[in-house]
Image (cartoon, rainbow, N blue to C red):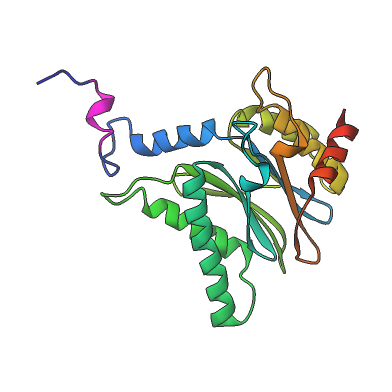
Amino acid sequence: MYPMNKASAYDHAITVFSPEGKLYQVDYAAKMVEKGALSIGLIYDKGVLLIGDKRLTSPLVKGDSVEKIYKIDNHVAAISSGMTGDARKLTQMARQEAQENIMYYDEPIEIEPLAKKIASIYQAFTQYGGARPFGVSFIIAGVDDSGYRLFETDVSGGLLEYFACAIGKNRDEAVKLLEKNYKDGLSFNDAVALGLKCLKLGLDQKEVLTAERIEVAFINDNKKFTKLSISEIDGALKKLK
């Protein structure tokens, strides 16, 4: 038999822990998220804001065909980093969960139970053979009777609530910027400006942040999901400069 290193003996099956207490396939899925374009979520004074880099890979790609922010219901949305196909599948499950809640209880789903449901789906795909972990993370943002809510999921099924958070490439640098500049009661314009500053940290050396590659959406006190137009994003970029 060919010699095998220690890690390779444990990275073929999702259900096998290594002696170091690792599930290697989960670690590999997390690496996929780390390579994804940066995504930011913030709570501002009148709602929640999601802002992300769509990272257009070619000038031939139509920018509006790339979806980074997903509307789940009028009062809740998610932004992804990682594998787009996995993001669409999880979004479909989340939308189904939201619609079933309306059918069964005649009221919109609350943000925290929805986030926990999505996290449970993540976790299930780390526990059973014949499946692989999802190679995507979400920031789930919404407004319900409990207030403005912002949750981050990871590929292991972990779930944390934040005032502001980041996922994707150069996440740690973006988090440091948020920790330094985020404050309670941030205005909408200041929140957008801070989010754009964070996105610049996810760029490669020769890349330029343009309105066409950015997606911005918010949900306010009216519990209404709204996306900014390219012209509005371009105006925010010009103010930042």
Tell me where residue 72 appears, x and y as whole percent. Answer: 61, 62
**In the displayed structure, does residue 42 sit left or right of residue 32?**
right
Q: Quadrant of the C terminus?
A: top right
For residue 62, which quarter of the picture? top right
The location of residue 157, given as percent across then percent down, is: 46, 49
Q: For the point 31% across and 49% down, which residue is it?
A: 131
Give the residue displayed 53% in from the left and 31% down from the top.
Answer: 35
Comparing 212 with 146, the one in front is 212
Residue furthest to the right in view is 239
Q: How far across and down, in percent of the image, does residue 193 sit?
A: 82, 37
Q: Does residue 148 lie above or below 67 as drawn?
A: below
Q: Main secondary structure of the magenta part?
A: loop
Say which quadrant the N terminus sits in.
top left
> Which stretch appears magenta?
5-12
- For the residue pair 234 and 103, the one nearer the viewer reads as 234
Residue 83 is one of the magenta-drawn residues: no
What residue is drawn where x is 56% and y is 80%? Answer: 103
- Residue 95, percent from left and from top: 55, 65
Residue 106 shows in this picture: yes
Position of 206 with respect to 96 (left or right) is right
Spot the residue most to the front: 60
Whether 177 is drawn above or below 52: the answer is above
In this rendering, position of residue 155 left or right of residue 50:
left
- Vertical side of 134 occupied by 179: above or below: above
Specify whether residue 6 is painted magenta. Answer: yes
Residue 22 shows up from this direction:
no
